[in-house]
Image (cartoon, rainbow, N blue to C red):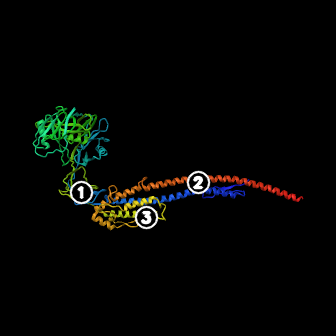
Amino acid sequence: MPALEYFMGTTSSTSAIFKGTSAYSSDFSNVISRAVAIATLPVTQLTNNKADLSSQSDELTKLDTKFSALQSAIQKIGSALGGSAFQTSVSSDNVADVSVADGAREGVYSMKVTSIGAYETSMSTANWNVAADPSGKPTTFTLVAGNQNYSVTPADNSPQSVADAINLNYGNLVQATTVNVAPGDTRIALKSASLGQTNLDLLQVPLSAPTTSLQQQAAAGYAISQSTALWDASGSPATYTLVIGGDQHDIAPASNSAADVASAINAAYGSQVRASVVDLGSGSSHDYRISLQGTAAGPMNGSMTLDLKKGGGASLQAQQTAATSRTAAAWNAATDAAGTRTTYSLVAGSTRYTFTPADNSAASVTAAINSLYGNLVRASVVDLGTGGSPDYRISLQSKVGSSTLFDIQKTTGASFQREQTPGTLASYEINNSGVINSSATRNITISDGVTATLLGTSGGSAVDITVTRSTSAINTALSGFADAYNAAVDELGTQRGQSGGALAGQSIVGQLSALLSGISTFTSSGQISGLAGLGLDLGTDGHLTYNAFTLMSADLTNSTGVTSFLGSATGGGFLKVASDALTSLETPVTGLLKSAQTDMKSQIAKLGDTISTKQSQVDALQLKLQNQMAIADALIASMEQQYSYLSGMFSAQESANSLYR
């Protein structure tokens, strides 16, 4: 039986070994080797292509590293212009402490501080000893802060539990602490988190406490109008035309002031309409308007119009939504008895909103409603009194354009606190502007990135605040930028010319070169027109040379120009252009370099899969040929054995025949 031994290589680069026993076994081996070599040619070409792509991918990675470093260097220039690079000084350290952040600019500011404000404080009037609810349920207290009511339900009624519950839920509004004012006398102290009057209190309102409804509903509504613009009191006294429904009446006030016009209206036609002056301004900036309200619900002389005209001119009033709710009787502004506090509820349809104003006056209740719930309703005070006896009522107008019924209800609860320190707002003036500002915080932003923390008053005169930028940080950043830029230039240079690297001739090399050129040749129309003004000179070899002395001179004589030229990554200037250019390269997925790397890796992976498939086909062909040649070789070897056997028999017979002749 012929013997066949062969070894099957795992790759086309390993020659298959075929051994047979026939005289033609070497020919069979040559046939297999030639066929496999021909079949391997595409695999070899694909492998070479993959090696080329891998080299290109490696070079893209190197370029990405260089340009990523350049992007980082640009960002560091921006950081060198940020808050950490600035220094501040104040001519009087006991007036303000100044801090800077990103966005700051060099400059000198003046600040006159007339008041640093005060945080309102209150403390329990006696030892805290509130009995537990007989039902065993936790007691719910009402915290009053800024006219708003907040429910507080502590684990128990101990002073520490109540203070903890307040701090946990409303620590952004008030700080609660327990104070041992004497042995056996522990009280709860409250301090507002913001400057100004916040009416701090702790109440206990029994669930069964009776409520009193104060408003009377009027479906037809009370007509209301208000001046459309700031009241013009200029000129000699004029004659005004008052429109009440379908009737017109002339009035002649003592002057054109809003107060005199309103007084003349009330004196002559107070039984039909009530005029009042409202100030829509803020602080020291007044915006006086005249508000007109009908005294009776429904149309007046066939119409709901209330208007004023000056000297027969254009209408001065804007008609407003009619008030559908007004206090049924004269408003009771009586002061609460000691240890009690009146709390109010604005009822809008089926929803109840509770609040506690500073006092029980109609003005305070109205102000609280407008401040807290002005998106739902507008509250106003109308005086229906005559003969010098005021009769204040509160009117409610819907702001949501619906037929919602509005009511004001009041109830009385136990008050545990007494004010210790009244809250006041901080007051200051910037750069002798004449504008006196009020603030509920002592941290005042006097310019972008510049914040002054008020420490004390300035004694009637302003203090100077100076903000300067350090040159050291920007010097280091520009030096680092030059190094990163030159490194990117050098890496690109290895991909050009006859001895260029794997990316030689690729369009991306030209694109990256153009991008670098756009950065290094950036120009501005300002006092500093190019990078050379900062000490960055572009040589004929494409490299940047940095001269720190040029920067120091420019920053010393024209720091504003340096800042303006550099700009910011989002606001303009050199940093905007450079940042945008590098972002177009380095943005994940869509950036030029990032997408090129991704595409290259995808091509390499696909080639790898194709090579594997082709190699499997070559291996299969090789195995098939080996099997076929083995069969042929075995058949020929068998025939050769038979031939040798027969040839031996004939030779033996011829030899025997020759012996017997």
Q: Give the quadrant of the C terminus.
A: bottom right
**Residue 205 in the figure: left or right of residue 313:** right
Q: Is residue 333 visible?
A: no
Picture residue at 29% right of the left edge, 37% below the top: 133
How far apart in space, not on screen, are marks 2 and 3 (Cα)? 40 Å
| SS at badge 1 | strand
Picture residue at 35% right of the left edge, 58% below the top: 577
- What residue sits right under mark 1 in the picture? 96
**Residue 297 in the figure: left or right of residue 583:** left
| SS at badge 3 | helix
- For the residue pair 592 and 327, the one nearer the viewer reads as 592
- Return the mark for residue 615: 2
Instruction: Tell me which label, 1 or 3, sits earlier in the chain.
Output: 1
- What residue sits right under mark 3 in the picture? 490
How far apart in space, not on screen, are marks 1 and 3 (Cα)? 51 Å
Q: Amino acid at mark 2?
A: Gln
Q: Nearer the viewer, mark 1 or mark 3?
A: 3
Task: Please identify the quarter of the rendering in which residue 292 is found.
Answer: top left
**Residue 537 in the figure: left or right of residue 625:** left
Q: Nearer the viewer, mark 1 or mark 2?
A: 2
Q: Pointers 2 and 3 in contact (CB under 8 A)?
A: no
